[in-house]
Image (cartoon, helix red, strand yellow):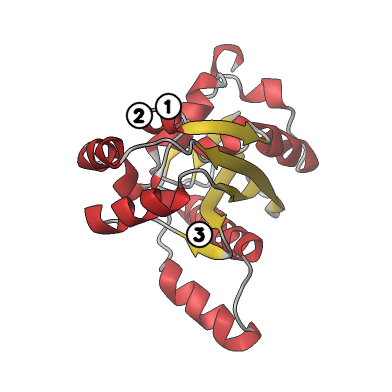
Amino acid sequence: MRVCLASTSPARLMLLRQAGIEPETSAPQVDEDAVIAEVEAARGRLAADAHVLLLARRKAADVAARLADDDPDFDGIVIGGDSMFEIGGEILGKPYTPEAATARWQDMRGKTGVLHSGHSVIRVSPGRPAVEAHAVAEASVSFVADITDAEIAAYVASGEPLQVAGAFTVDSLGGAFIERVDGDPSTVVGMSLSTVRRLAREVGVEWPDLWASLS
């Protein structure tokens, strides 16, 4: 069974590969800022869990629709995801600049925040309507209190925290500065594998059927 990851995230791709799945990838053509602005204009400010779920569903739907047009023989699932980090009542996306990443780490040390990860799984098969299941997974992340300014500067200089939600990773250089993760650890990497497994089952797909070695 084919799997299409509606993302170009290296972390999400790595997670699926480590789980025995070799997905195709497709970049969703979704203007995230415009989607959020439109929905918030109608409903008011979105909570973090609603924010990530909305974007995960839009991304998966966009790729699924294009697959139906461009690859009508596609038989499998499309997986979409989005993540945001919340700490101290503030929602943090990607910092993008060294200055922003440095300020975040100086503020986060010794604190605990929550990583919200939205998931959408769409079953696509020839001649049948698409079926979707979705959910949000959360994991709390506690940072060490004794990270020094020099360590923060070195980590920021590596470039790693600039393009990730919350300005940290748990599976690479940033892992040494994280004291504890409560929840599915893969959620913090970018996608909860246990959640994706459950959603796949909801749309009629068993997890072992996705393993590349058995396809």
Asked if residue 142 is positioned above or below residue 113 in the image, the reply reads above
Residue 139 position, x and y percent, is: 64, 42
Return the mark for residue 176.
1
Determine the image quadrant of residue 185: top right
In this view, the residue farthest toward the left is 157
Residue at the location (61% across, 73% down)?
46
Amino acid carrying label 2: it is Leu
Residue 160 position, x and y percent, is: 30, 39
Which quadrant of the figure contains the C terminus?
A: top right
In this view, the residue farthest toward the top is 213
Measure how far apart labels 3 and 1 are at the Cα level.
37 Å
The answer to whether residue 34 is seen in the rendering is: yes
Residue at the location (71% across, 51% down)?
135
Asked if residue 13 is positioned above or below residue 127 in the image, the reply reads above
Secondary structure beneath label 1 = helix
The answer to whether residue 27 is seen in the rendering is: no
Measure how far apart labels 1 and 2 are at the Cα level.
7 Å
Return the mark for residue 105.
none
Mark 3 vs 2, N-terminal side: 3
Closer to the camera in the image, 3 or 114: 114
Mark 3 vs 1, N-terminal side: 3
Q: Which residue is mark 3?
A: 62
Q: Which residue is mark 2?
A: 173
Answer whether labels 1 and 2 touch (C-beta < 8 Å): yes
- Between disc 3 and disc 2, the foreground one is 2
Residue 128 located left or right of residue 97: right
